[in-house]
Image (cartoon, helix red, strand yellow):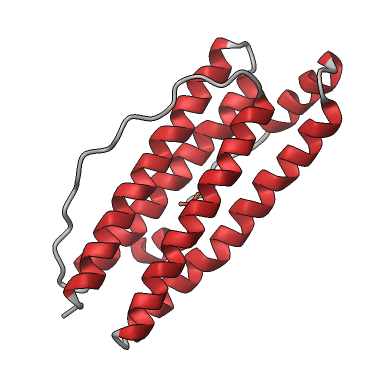
Amino acid sequence: MINKKLEDAINAQINAELWSAYLYLSMATNFHAKGLGGIANWFEIQFKEEQDHAMIFYNYLISRGARVELKPIEAVKTSWESPLEAFEDTLKHEQVVTGLINDINALAVEVKDYATQSRLTWFIDEQVEEEETAQKMIDSLRMIKDNGYAIYMFDKELAARTYIQASPLATNAE
Ligand code: FEO
């Protein structure tokens, strides 16, 4: 059996991951409306990845015999003036998520739940990547400023991103 406080924290994290998915899908719609389909593609894939994150926690709670409780998903922002504003929000949001993952890990350490600590390792590594990627986008966009051709090329580059299912889900499917 999993500690009740830990079960509640993981349920809250499922909600946070689904909220993240909703946030990135909202960013995607924003950029479709602005004719930046490549940036929209990048955020649609981010949306799918966040759903994967929620499902990893969902599967984990089930495998531990715990109850998944799906809570309401709060509304998200719907409009971003520029790609830079969206990626700055992305970085800020991912930093919050990193804090949440760290808090769950601290709780798992406190209650000596080694299985949860092991499961969280993937997320701890993933958060490093999430923050690094958002920071790189911000760096590029700060260089680009309002240069239309550079924004066109940036959009083209992001159009090439493809979805890869998160590895813990692929393992579970075997
Ligand atoms: Fe689920 Fe972007 O962290």
Left-right relation of 130 to 23: right
Q: Is residue 153 above or below residue 97?
A: above
Q: Which residue is painted at 51% across and 27% down in the image?
A: 27
- Give the percent coordinates (x, y) of residue 106: 40, 76
Where is residue 30 drawn, in percent x and y?
A: 52, 18
What residue is drawn where x is 85% and y is 18%?
147
Q: Tell me, yes or no, if residue 108 can be seen here.
A: yes
Give the percent coordinates (x, y) of residue 173: 35, 61
> What residue sits 78% from the left and 21% below the top?
151
Residue at image position (28%, 55%) is 12
Is 83 above or below relative to 19? above
Q: Quarter of the image holding residue 40?
A: top right
Decide if residue 82 is on the left or right side of residue 50: right
Q: In the picture, residue 82 is in which quadrant? A: top right
145 horizontally vs 56: left or right = right
User: Where's the N terminus, which quadrant?
Assistant: bottom left
